[in-house]
Amino acid sequence: MSYEKVLQAGKIVIGTKQTIRALKEGEATEVIVAEDADLPIIEKVTAAANEANVPVTKVDSMKKLGKACKIQVGAAAVAILR
């Protein structure tokens, strides 16, 4: 499951803006998006990932994704870096 990928990843960035920046800079190898995030956010991140030819994995919960990133709040998007 994708939560484990986040836990095992060496380097990640958390959040929509940082994820999009990592995609534009060619640093991201995979993007994880929470399905319960706002639709415009999901669409923005997914479009940036498609443009960069980076796979997008969807998970069900922002709260669980945040917990996998070891933060106290939910996370809408996370990028796994090279």
Image: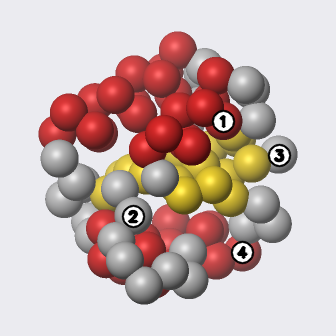
Relative to 58, say whether 59 is above or below.
below
**In the drawing, does residue 31 fall left or right of residue 64?**
right
**What's the distance in space between the residues labelled 1 and 2, CA to CA?**
16 Å
Residue at x-position 57% and y-position 43%:
18
Q: Nearer the viewer, residue 37 or 3?
A: 37
Residue beneath label 4, please?
A: 8
**Numbered disc in front, either 4 or 2:** 2
**What's the distance in space between the residues labelled 4 and 3, CA to CA?**
13 Å
Image location of residue 69, percent across then percent down = 55, 75
- Circle 4 packing at 10 Å, graded few (<14), some (14-19), many (20+), is few
Q: Amino acid at mark 1?
A: Ala
Residue beneath label 3, please?
A: 82
Upstream in the sequence, badge 1 or badge 2? Answer: 1
Upstream in the sequence, badge 3 or badge 2? Answer: 2
Q: How many marks?
A: 4
Upstream in the sequence, badge 3 or badge 1? Answer: 1
Disc number at residue 75?
2
- Circle 1 packing at 10 Å, graded few (<14), some (14-19), many (20+), is many
**What's the distance in space between the residues labelled 4 and 2, CA to CA?**
17 Å
| Residue 32 seen anywhere in this rendered image of the structure | no
**Numbered disc in front, either 1 or 4:** 1
